[in-house]
Amino acid sequence: MTQAKTDHYTNSALKIGQVDNYPDRVAGEFISKVVSNDSVNGEYKLIVVEVHEAALRAYAGQMFHLLCPSPDSSEVWMRRPMSIYRINRDARQLEFLYKVEGRGTRGIATLNAGDEFNIAGPLGHGFTLDPQWKNIVVLGRGVGLATLAPLSQLAADNGVGVTAILSARSPDVVMSRDLFEACGAKVVTVVDTDNSSEVGNVEKILAGLIAEKKADAFFTCGSERLLKLMQRLGREHNVPGQVAMEQIMVCGIGACYVCMRTFEVNGEKVLKRVCRDGPVFNMQEAVAW
Ligand code: FES
């Protein structure tokens, strides 16, 4: 029975349809096949899955809702939204970078090469590039770097230069460096262990990039203090920006309202659902938490 199910469903789409009222947002439920699920450092793992070609419509900043196996005998399975780390269209693969900390990610960590993995998506609004932009600055910290990583691909595909400022607690947990470098980005690493990640130092780096005209737009994820810094510099120097918001989610499709956050649009406070209206938003509209 197990073999018959595998033959029938692996890499297939169970259901594909429109999301909400957005004709351009087609999502589906897919049975992917795990290619690998390995540790990349002491904290994070990377799961690579082979998917149906319809799942490869995903773009940078979007998410999938992953059906996490139970990590123990209680057999409680749950979906967890996770942003895409890399889209490899040639190999028909998606990659997700995750930290093993809760029940869902502990369940994902139990998957082995060859296992089936139910994923639903792509969901949400991701990053966009204005054709006028020639050089962008990407600034992220911690697992926020995983969300920003696909920007390296998007920028490379559009001939846009990238300076990536990667912030982390220590050099051994800096992530996404390889992806950015492979796409030709200039990478600057700042870490807590030598205080180079302090806001004052990051501000100096950003100010230098603005002066060199290497900052047509800002992108950030993963740190409130870095978001506030980019918002301030963006206002002062008229640099547009986008932020990928991190938020607890349940349904991932706009139905449960668990992911509501406050934004400021044209001087008015408004509530938005991060999963459906984002997770990527205009940086100046985001209200730091
Ligand atoms: Fe349910 Fe966003 S997670 S509305």
Image (spheres, rainbow, N blue to C red):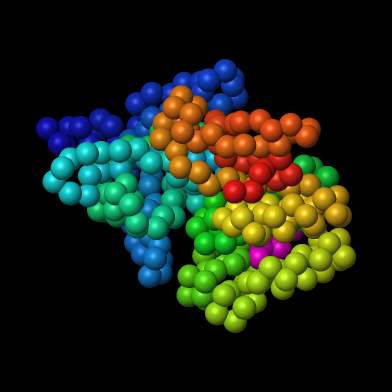
Residue 170 versus residue 56 in the image, above or below? below
Residue 198 versus residue 226 in the image, above or below? below
Residue 133 position, x and y percent, is 80, 49
- Of all residues, the one furthest to the top in this rendering is 21
33 relative to 151 in the view: left or right: left
- In which quadrant of the rendered image does the N terminus lie? top left
- Of all residues, the one furthest to the bottom in this rendering is 194
In the image, 165 versus 273, the foreground residue is: 273
Residue drawn at point x = 78 percent, y = 34 percent: 267
Residue 87 versus residue 5 in the image, above or below? below
Residue drawn at point x = 57 percent, y = 18 percent: 21
In the image, 9 versus 167, the foreground residue is: 167
Q: Residue 270: which quarter of the image?
A: top right
Magenta span main SS: strand
Q: Residue 163: which quarter of the image?
A: bottom right
Residue drawn at point x = 47 percent, y = 21 percent: 17
Residue 150 position, x and y percent, is 58, 51
90 relative to 102 in the view: left or right: right
Residue 119 position, x and y percent, is 37, 37
188 relative to 47 in the view: left or right: right
Residue 184 position, x and y percent, is 67, 63
Which region shows up in magenta?
161-165
